[in-house]
């Protein structure tokens, strides 16, 4: 199946998609108060909808929104009550990372075609 990233009509550029993947890759490591997870979850859904629609402007806005919500953006005191994202959100993020992966990119962490490890 061809992803929207492969389509020239998406209006999105490679740098924006790379930033989206980078942010999404970080989400599973985030720790937030339980009540605070609704905002990042909504940003992930907005990002997915914008990507699916091929709307580069909306995608840029969703990426910016997720970036602002990142707990990595500001050094904060860790609270033992902070929790990781829910399992459904982690699964959604993982699926979205794979959906917007560049053609030929191995999202498991190894470059495609990198078989010179012996």
Image (cartoon, grey):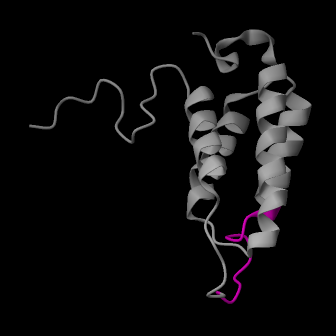
Q: Is residue 83 above or below residue 52?
A: below
Q: Is residue 61 above or below residue 86?
A: above
**Does the magenta segment cover residue 76?**
yes
Count of marks placed on residues: 0
Residue at horizontal 63 percent and vertical 39 percent from the top: 18
- Residue furthest to the left in view is 118
Residue 15 falls in image quadrant? top right
Is any atom of residue 11 visible in this view? no
Residue 34 x %, y % = 74, 71
Residue at horizontal 68 percent and vertical 34 percent from the top: 17
Residue 37 x %, y % = 77, 63
Is any atom of residue 80 visible in this view? yes
Residue 46 x %, y % = 84, 39
Residue 27 x %, y % = 63, 57
**Does the magenta segment cover residue 113?**
no
Q: Main secondary structure of the magenta part?
A: loop
Quarter the C terminus occupies: top left
Pick the front one: 41 or 54:
41
Q: Which residues are magenta?
A: 68-78
């Amino acid at each position: 199946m061809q992803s929207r990233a492969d389509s020239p009509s998406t209006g999105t550029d490679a740098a924006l998609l790379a930033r989206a993947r980078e942010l999404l890759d970080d989400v599973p490591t985030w720790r937030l108060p339980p009540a605070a997870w609704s905002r990042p979850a909504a940003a992930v859904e907005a990002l997915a909808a914008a990507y699916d629609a091929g709307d580069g402007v909306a995608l840029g806005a969703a990426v910016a929104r997720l970036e602002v919500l990142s707990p990595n953006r500001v050094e904060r005191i860790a609270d033992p009550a902070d929790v990781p994202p829910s399992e459904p959100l982690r699964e959604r993020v993982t699926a979205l990372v794979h959906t917007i992966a560049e053609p030929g990119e191995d999202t498991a962490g190894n470059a495609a075609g990198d078989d010179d490890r012996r």
